[in-house]
Amino acid sequence: MKQRDLLYEGKAKSVYRTEKKGRLIVRFRHDITAFDGGKKDVLQDKGSYNARVSAFFFKYLEKHGVKTHFVSMLDDRTMVVRELTMIPLEVIVRNVAAGSIVRNYPFKEGTKLDPPVIVIDYKDDSRHDPMLNDDIITALKLCTQGELKKVKAVALKVNDLLAGLLAEQDITLVDFKMEFGRQGKTIYLGDEISMDSMRLWDKKTGESLDKDVYRFDKGDVMATYNRVAKRIIE
Ligand code: CDP
């Protein structure tokens, strides 16, 4: 697979065209950002931790019947993916109250949410990713009602699969964010699922094992990512 011109550059990943129709290359960079890009750093090897964990999850999900954009890895931070038309939604599934749901609503941090709560935000940094509801999503024509139903069903299935997998490693999947795209009428899970997009707590110690370590200066971010990646993959 040959890398061609840069198609899109996000906060932590760059997307390139390839010589093959319908295939893109995603390079996970070592950049890390938080608070709408207000905090930024470059951390050695970060890209490869996130890329390898994402690839591991995508393969696991595919094996269990979830359609993802993952095709293969070219090296430890470079992924070949199916080209999708992205739907600008951030689909968040929450199993435990933490982060914005605690800041914005009267939930106590650490409260179990059963059944899980799905929150969908509009992916638009200039508007600070405002929360949407079904009517706004369809009025803005971000996707059809049928697609939205499918996205929510897949999100809950991914949550069940990943929460179960992580529980085996004594990790609580507190919440995580997904992005979806379409190719024709088919919906695929896209983007990444990594320590940058999940909130993970050690079941025994309660310690954060994700980007909260960076957001709130809780310790050595890369040492944490390294340990978590090992725990998840090996
Ligand atoms: O992180 P913060 O409290 O600001 O936002 P949240 O709504 O509590 O985030 C819920 C989950 O989605 C966390 O695991 C975040 O890491 C993830 N997320 C993300 O990956 N990208 C965003 N733009 C927003 C949230």
Image: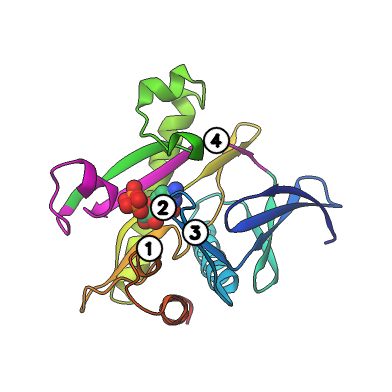
Q: CA distance from mark 1 to mark 4?
A: 27 Å
209, 70: nearer the viewer? 209
Going from N to C along the chain, the mark reached first, 1 or 4, is 4
According to the picture, the residue beneath numbered tag 2 turns out to be: 35
- Residue 7: x and y in percent read 74, 46
Going from N to C along the chain, the mark reached first, 3 or 4, is 3
Residue name at image x 58 percent, y 77 percent:
44
Q: What residue occupies the far front of the structure in this picture? A: 38
- Residue 211: x and y in percent read 40, 65
Q: Which residues are magenta?
A: 84-112
- Residue 77: x and y in percent read 65, 69
Marks 2 and 3: in contact by CB < 8 Å?
yes
Mark on residue 33? 3
Q: CA distance from mark 4 to mark 2?
A: 22 Å
Horizontal arrangement in the rendering, residue 225 relative to residue 170 (left or right)? right
Going from N to C along the chain, the mark reached first, 4 or 2, is 2
Helix or strand or loop: what does disc 4 sit on? Answer: loop
Helix or strand or loop: what does disc 3 sit on? Answer: strand
Above-or-below relation of 143 to 193: above
Tell me the amino acid under the disc marked 2. Phe
Tell me the amino acid under the disc marked 3. Thr
